[in-house]
Image (cartoon, rainbow, N blue to C red):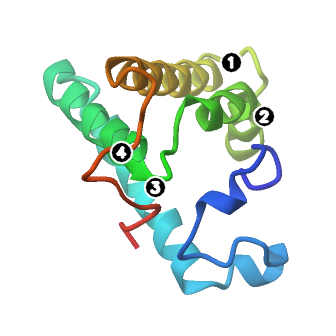
Amino acid sequence: MFDNVPNVRQRFTKVKADQEKSSLIADEMFLAHSHAVILALDQAIGLLDDPTKLKMKMTTLVKMHVHQNPPIGSEYFEPFASSSHTFAMVILGLPEDHPEVQAWVKFLYAFRNMVKAEEDALGGEAATEKARTCCTIL
């Protein structure tokens, strides 16, 4: 993500995101955030058969990002979503047109669309009085 999404490193205030890859993957805060992302994805996958709960989970994740200070908006999720097929192909070892790879691409675009809808609902002003510093999950 840090190599493929423009300006994403500067959004991580509790992680020394400018580190070399070998140092970054050993950073406790980076690993904690990575585990939080994996857990959120795992929870979302577990809710695929319950659309109501899945939407609630996704809405919570969207709000956590859009209401950060500075906000993590659709401009950051667009390049991530558009590169997601590459990540999925490498991780899953499957071709780009495989249904599982395409499912991940669709999932990440759906998340990006939800982020955009939340931004639009705020009138383009993502930060609020309740905004938090980025990555407070750490």
Q: Earlier in the sequence, mark 1 or mark 3?
A: 3
Q: Earlier in the sequence, mark 4 or mark 2?
A: 4
Q: Amino acid at mark 2?
A: Thr
Q: Earlier in the sequence, mark 1 or mark 2?
A: 2
Q: CA distance from mark 1 to mark 2?
A: 12 Å
- Residue 96's place in the image compared with 26, above or below, is above
Left or right, 74 with respect to 3, comes to: left
Q: Nearer the viewer, mark 1 or mark 3?
A: 3
Q: Residue at x 58, y 74 (%)?
A: 30
Q: Quadrant of residue 74?
A: top right
Residue corresponding to mark 2: 86
Q: Nearer the viewer, mark 1 or mark 2?
A: 2
Q: CA distance from mark 4 to mark 2?
A: 28 Å
Query: Quick one: SS at disc 1?
Result: loop
Residue 35, given in percent of the width and then of the height, sits at: 46, 66
Q: Quadrant of residue 77?
A: top right
Q: Residues within 10 Å of mark 4 (few under 14, many from 20)?
A: many
Q: Amino acid at mark 3?
A: Ile
Q: CA distance from mark 1 to mark 3?
A: 22 Å
The one of 42 and 2 positioned closer to us in this rendering? 2
Q: Earlier in the sequence, mark 1 or mark 4?
A: 4
Query: Quick one: SS at disc 4?
Result: loop
Q: CA distance from mark 1 to mark 4?
A: 35 Å
Residue corresponding to mark 4: 67
Q: Which mark is residue 38?
A: 3
